[in-house]
Image (spheres, rainbow, N blue to C red):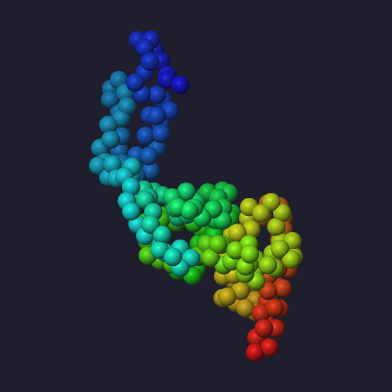
């Protein structure tokens, strides 16, 4: 809703909300705002701020396929995956959006990373693996199957991040102890408290893979 200018009684040209929004964007970019004597907004003096609203094309390598996206410099990998792709990859979840919960975990260059803290532009040309890259509902990976078999989920919001992190942990340390697995997965939180089932699932995968190794 447009705010009123108290001196004229007319609608204000710039609302308090839009002023604050613009100020925040500039501050985040390290720019400077010069207020006029009358307290009127804001002349932006950092020319780089202009580029924050522009978009650029880039190619992401997601689950082995090149995917073109149009993104702003500030677009996170999480949002590029979920909302900038056609078709979108919505398996990766946003819960906190601030690097606290691990729901958005993907692999970048084979290493687990929070996609909500990774800018899409920094991932151009680097291999990114999302939960969809490990398997599908019709052909689940061993970790995905174990999460189902061991009831490793309730609401399921944390589950894609846990699945990706568990794949990474077991690939890196196939014989990891329970304590080591707890450490490896310590960046992933589950508000529903499914941790015992998650670790049961990881142990089941370890046993199956060990049996597979012996059978060769
Ligand atoms: S959504 Fe990325 S860490 Fe929580
Ligand atoms: S299953 Fe609900 S947050 Fe983990």
Please give the name of the residue rendered at 38% of the width and 29% of the height, measured from the top-left corner: 19
Left or right relative to 113: residue 10: left
Residue 89 to residue 205: above or below: above
Please tell me in which quadrant of the rendered image residue 14 appears. top left
Please tell me in which quadrant of the rendered image residue 38 appears. top left
Residue 97 to residue 4: above or below: below
Q: Position of residue 56 (x, y in %)?
A: 32, 51
Q: Is residue 182 visible?
A: no
Left or right relative to 179: residue 41: left
Question: Can you say which quadrant of the picture contains the N terminus?
Answer: top left
Q: Position of residue 7 (x, y in %)?
A: 35, 11
Question: Can you say which quadrant of the picture contains the C terminus?
Answer: bottom right
Q: Which of these two is toward me, 143 or 98?
A: 143
Please give the name of the residue rendered at 54% of the width and 59% of the height, measured from the top-left corner: 105
Q: Is residue 72 visible?
A: yes
Q: Which of these two is toward me, 145 or 9?
A: 145
Q: Position of residue 115 (x, y in %)?
A: 49, 56
Number of labels in the image equals 0
Residue 26 to residue 65: above or below: above
Left or right relative to 91: residue 60: left
Q: Position of residue 146 (x, y in %)?
A: 70, 68
Residue 57 to residue 39: above or below: below
Please give the name of the residue rendered at 67% of the width and 83% of the height, measured from the top-left corner: 212
Furthest toward the front, the residue is 138
Q: Which of these two is toward me, 165 or 125?
A: 125
Please give the name of the residue rendered at 63% of the width and 55% of the height, measured from the top-left corner: 158
């Amino acid at each position: 809703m447009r705010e009123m200018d108290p001196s004229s009684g007319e609608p204000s040209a710039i609302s308090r909300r839009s002023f604050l929004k613009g100020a925040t964007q500039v501050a985040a970019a390290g720019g400077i705002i010069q207020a006029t004597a009358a307290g009127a907004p804001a002349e932006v003096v950092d020319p780089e701020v202009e580029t924050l609203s522009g978009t650029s094309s880039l190619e992401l390598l997601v689950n082995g396929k090149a995917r073109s996206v149009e993104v702003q410099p500030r677009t996170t990998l999480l949002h590029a995956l979920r909302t900038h792709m056609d078709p979108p990859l919505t398996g990766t979840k946003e819960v906190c959006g601030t690097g606290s919960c691990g729901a958005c975990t993907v692999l970048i260059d084979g290493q687990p990373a929070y996609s909500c803290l990774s800018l899409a532009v920094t991932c151009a040309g680097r291999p990114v693996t999302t939960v969809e890259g490990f398997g599908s509902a019709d052909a689940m990976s061993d970790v995905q199957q174990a999460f189902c078999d061991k009831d490793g989920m309730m609401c399921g919001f944390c589950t894609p991040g846990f699945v990706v992190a568990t794949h990474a942990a077991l690939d890196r340390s196939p014989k990891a102890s329970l304590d080591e697995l707890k450490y490896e997965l310590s960046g992933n939180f589950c508000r529903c408290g499914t941790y015992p089932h998650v670790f049961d699932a990881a142990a089941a995968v370890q046993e199956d893979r060990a049996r597979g190794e012996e059978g060769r």
